[in-house]
Amino acid sequence: MKKIFTMAAAVAMTAMTMVSCDNGASANLKDGVDTLAYDLGLAQSEGLKQYMSYQLGVDTTYMDEFIEGLQKGTVSEADPKKEAYLKGMEIGRQVQQMAKGLGQQVYGDDSTKTVNAKLIAAGLVDGLKGTGKMTAEEAGKEYQKMIEPIQQAALEKQYGDNKKAGEKFLAENKKKEGVHVTASGLQYKVLVEGTGALPSDTSKVKVNYEGKLIDGTVFDSSYERNQPFTVDLLMPRVIPGWVEALKLMPAGSKWEVVIPQELGYGSQNMGQIKPFSTLIFTIEVLK
């Protein structure tokens, strides 16, 4: 994870109960939240080295002073050593804000619980000193593995009604006359029967389309732009539901395609398209 360090970035997570003890050289980790906090700091440590050198201009000869400032967050007059201390203090303050954001995501509205900012700092320190339980890259992977299902659960809680509405729509739509349902759950209705060839896995398919939400809101339309869209099926770069539908449509076809959220954008927030949105497309294969 060799990225420029951005400590002000918000961290998304919710609670978990995994237990870990004494995994870091400078931290006593008592539970899963402690481990997440520590891993977050350790994962960012490699980027911090670059940030302190190139963005803050700190001489790495004074790493101990930088770390002391990071941990204690006190101010001192500027000279090479004291400047490193000062910059460490700035990072320490940002770590406190990171811990607050982390706590809000982990514990929600429960203000009686907090994430220990010192454990995030401990991960950073171990990474800077090279005494961590793993490399920054390894910690980043572990952190992502732990946080992804937690983020998913948070999205399920926030957008659960949206998901249920899509499932209800799909259940009702499949009963309508002329609607076909594939093994994946994709639904389509033939509006115009095409007589051309079916595309292959390497075809480039030129289409016009309109996309809307189940409430009728149009979020995209090549018709409005008067600009057809080409999909390269070798490298489609479109949602899975589109790929599946296009491979079933002979040239000249025009279908109404209803795409379940798992074949669409899933848990991604795409602006007008909220997480777990079922999508309706009118797709016309031109050639």
Image (cartoon, grey):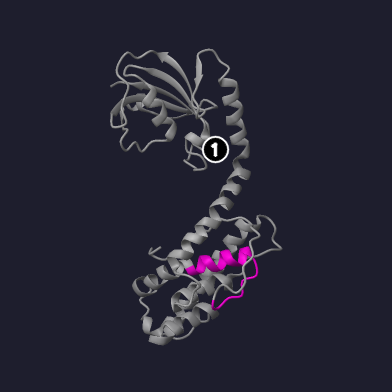
Identify which residue is drawn at 58% across, 76% down: 27
Please give the range of residues in magenta: 25-42
Image coordinates for residue 147, horizontal then vertical, percent: 55, 56
Looking at the image, is 203 positioned above or below residue 136? above
Residue type at mark 1 is Phe
Q: In which quarter of the image is residue 65?
A: bottom left
Q: Main SS type for the magenta part?
A: helix
Identify which residue is drawn at 34% across, 72% down: 54
Q: Nearer the viewer, residue 94 or 22?
A: 22
Q: Can residue 227 be seen in this view?
A: no
Image coordinates for residue 168, horizontal then vertical, percent: 61, 27
Identify which residue is drawn at 62% across, 33% down: 164
Q: To which residue does mark 1 refer? A: 276
Number of marks present in the image shown: 1
Relative side of 18 to 274, left or right: right
Which quarter of the rendering shows the C terminus? top left
Looking at the image, is 189 positioned above or below residue 160? above
Image coordinates for residue 198, horizontal then vertical, percent: 32, 21
Around disc 1, counting alpha carbons within 10 Å, would you say few (fewer than 14), some (14 to 19), or many (20 or more)? many
Q: Which of 141 and 92 is in front in this view?
A: 141
Which quarter of the rendering shows the N terminus? bottom left
Q: Nearer the viewer, residue 22 or 174?
A: 22
Identify which residue is drawn at 59% across, 52% down: 150
Instruction: Find numbered disc 1 in the image and state the secondary structure of the residue it sits on.
Output: loop
Relative side of 45 to 166, left or right: left
Q: Nearer the viewer, residue 71 or 142?
A: 142
Q: Can residue 28 be found in the magenta stretch?
A: yes
Q: Can residue 127 be found in the magenta stretch?
A: no
Image coordinates for residue 38, horizontal then vertical, percent: 55, 69
